[in-house]
Image (cartoon, rainbow, N blue to C red):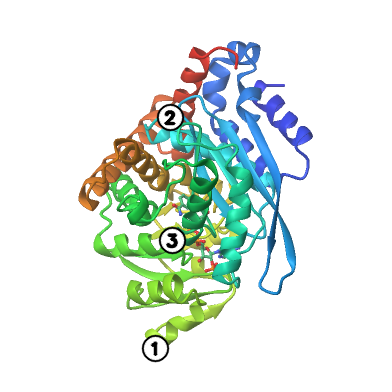
Amino acid sequence: MSYVDEVIAKVVEQNPSEPEFHQAVKEVLESLRVVIEANEEKYRKDALLERMVNPERQFKFRVPWVDDKGQVQVNTGYRVQFNSAIGPYKGGIRLHPSVNIGIIKFLGFEQVFKNSLTGLPIGGGKGGSDFDPKGKSDREVMAFCQSFMTELCKYIGADTDVPAGDIGTGAREIGYMFGQYKRIRGLYEGVLTGKGLSYGGSLARTEATGYGLLYLTQELLKLNGIELAGKTVCVSGAGNVAIYAIEKAQQLGAKVVTASDSTGWVYDPDGIDVAALKEIKEVKRARLTEYKNYRPNAEYHEGRGVWSVKCDVALPCATQNELLIDDAKQLAANGCLAVCEGANMPTTMDATEYLQKNGVIFAPGKAANAGGVATSALEMTQNSERLSWTFEEVDAKLQGIMVNICHNMVDAAERYGMKGNYVAGANIAGFEKVVDAMNAQGIV
Ligand code: NDP
């Protein structure tokens, strides 16, 4: 059995009931097969892959808090510190009822390669809880965040592990967590990113993932001789990534016609009204059903359906496994030119393969959504300097980083004879740097 297959089999056996983690490991190792087989003997002797698929450490903890009725609630908190070969662990905190250790490990594993790809000195980690901030009062969210941080603060720090936002963790939650960290540890340090501007946050962090996605998409299309301006774009999601992806796509001259949330989706033939979307989702925290009140010409549909709309570019920006094989077939049949992932692993493996085989340009989230973590790293730099850069400075750096990631991904794929396979390209480029650092640091 090849080393890759051996390690995949071990991961499945040793981590039962973690299908998302299996999926992420398979996706990464399969695409690295050529690189690994070229060094099989050495890697096997060093147990390199076993060390890569096992987190350096992981924490699971109780998070008790009191709800508005005086009832004690108990959630489970997680932090997985996956790999620190190239820098302190870095990765978001996901607050969603679906969170379990397998989801956090899949996200942490992917984060290692994504962070490496940015070219910045950050290792990979991820955390979260099965707490659902939706429908909770501000006081309840604060109570949860304070309890969560009371335990988490033992394991993190500006030079060890720097969490950030993710699904369900926005500026409000980061603020409560930062306050509690400072109170318990007595340290005013850049221990979290995605902070508010008045206490060490970076300008352009809010926009970074969505904007970065478009910078990479535009560059990748350009390398393939395609102009983004004038194209029709379908976006899924209506959260942080989706909103700023839509905003930047429109600034770059494309027309975005869809958005979605966990209950339904909208089709707006005149182009999504970003101001309305921001008001519905960022201010009112309401459902997309409200969109029609702002744009009577738009259609609202219950359930899924974004990928049935004809488009040139598709940007899945909601959650994992939201673009399935039938969606991929529909997109390709409708003449879609490119799918670039704003979310983490939104496209299933069979859908990805179908798109690649049918000539659709496919940029994996690891590269395409790395703008968020890259700007988080820029926030860490500003915190260390005790300075704040202007929006334009951060945005220009973000643009440079995304263009660089795009070229590294394209070049790595070509170097190993897989021109146009950007999944392989992104994984190889990220993997090479981590391997180099791990080898230099000995067996640790
Ligand atoms: P948000 O919580 O702000 O938004 C998520 C959006 O996706 C919401 O519109 C939500 O709907 C929708 N959604 C969630 N679950 C489902 C589901 N099961 N089916 C359909 N829609 C769903 O999260 P973000 O925008 O921050 O994150 C989106 C994705 O991008 C995630 O995969 C995240 O890991 C990834 N990512 C985020 C980064 C960031 O900087 N924020 C950085 C890199 C990756 P509803 O409004 O109903 O909740």
**Separation of marks 2 and 1 at Cα, in angstroms:** 46 Å
**Separation of marks 2 and 3 at Cα, in angstroms:** 27 Å
Q: Assess mark 1: CB under 8 A from ligand 1?
A: no
Give residue 392's position: percent from left, percent from top. Answer: 21, 50
Give residue 156's position: percent from left, percent from top. Answer: 54, 38
Q: Residues within 10 Å of mark 2 (few under 14, many from 20)?
A: many
Q: Identify the mark at residue 240; answer none if there is no mark.
A: 3
> What residue appears at the point 39 percent right and 44 percent down from the top-left corner?
376
Q: Identify the mark at residue 410; answer none if there is no mark.
A: none
Disc 3 residue type (three-letter): Asn
> What residue appears at the point 49 percent right and 42 percent down from the top-left corner?
186
64 vs 348, left or right, is right
Disc 2 residue type (three-letter): Ala
Q: Which residue, given by chain and number where applicable, does mark 1 sit on? A: 296
Residue 364, can we see it? no
SS under mark 3: helix
Q: Identify the mark at residue 429; answer none if there is no mark.
A: 2
Residue 412, can we see it? yes
Disc 1 residue type (three-letter): Pro
SS under mark 1: loop
- Which quadrant of the figure contains the N terminus? top right
Give residue 78's position: percent from left, percent from top. Answer: 65, 45
Among the two numbered marks 2 and 1 on one chain, the one whose residue lies closer to the N terminus: 1
Of 73 and 59, nearer the camera is 73
